[in-house]
Amino acid sequence: MTRQPFFQALIHYLHQHQDVTLRQIKAAFEGEKNLDRQLDAYIEAGYIRRENRRYQKAFRLLDSLVGLSLDQEIFVDTESTLFDQVKEITFRRQMTNSTNDLVIEEEVDLVRERLTLDSYFYKMRTQEELSEDQKKLYVILGDVNPDYALKYMTSFLLKFTRKERVIQRRSDIFVEALVILGFLEQVAPQTYALTMEVDPEQLIFRKI
């Protein structure tokens, strides 16, 4: 709901205008289809408040970084200095898989704009718009099933527990994806080296 263009435009409007009437909203968004129905949905969801036939946003903009967690819903003014701080907040995330015991650990930013495998799968699941860096991965993987992708990615990464260099003679989209993600580097034709830190006991492959 919050990704709908009308919702975002309406929130901007209500942020700039206080206690507006339905007539004012309809004048500002002339031509918007099913406006009344959409307004009712936003009110029911708790994003908009209607009192005495006046409308206003029913949430506060973020004013503190205390207690923030990954993937919680927040509203922040993108023109504020606080937004620049929000973009710098990161969390360590671990991805497991059903094929083996290997764990991929990455540092994920709060707004999920950086190129990480965790954020890529998250945006595929939520259908959010990809960042420019993430679009490079989409060219290779598309809307791939995460379990299917991790099966091949982790199986290839496991080879580096036995070798410093691994040869992949045939073209493989999952190996290409690992290179784009910065997990591997191609050091010679068809030859790859790991660029991650490895905990050999717990099989944690950590993106540097």
Image (spheres, rainbow, N blue to C red):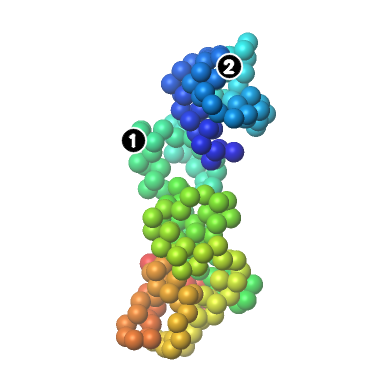
Mark 2 belongs to which amino acid?
Answer: Leu
- Residue occupying image coordinates x 38% and y 82%: 192
Q: Quadrant of the C terminus?
A: bottom left
Disc 2 and disc 1: Cα gap in Å? 33 Å
Between 169 and 186, the one lying in front of the other is 169
- Residue occupying image coordinates x 55% and y 51%: 127
Between 122 and 189, the one lying in front of the other is 189
Asked if residue 163 shows in the view, the reply is no
| Relative image position of residue 42 (x, y in whole percent) | 62, 30
Residue at the far front in the pictured view: 31
Q: Is residue 15 above or below residue 121?
A: above
| Relative image position of residue 162 (x, y in whole percent) | 47, 88
Q: Is residue 42 above or below residue 173?
A: above
Between 16 and 165, the one lying in front of the other is 16
Q: Find disc 1 in the rendering and name its residue.
A: 81
- Residue occupying image coordinates x 40% and y 73%: 179
Mark 2 and mark 1 lie on one chain; the one further toward the N terminus is 2
Mark 1 belongs to which amino acid?
Answer: Thr
User: Which labelled disc corresponds to residue 22?
Assistant: 2
| Relative image position of residue 17 (x, y in whole percent) | 46, 18
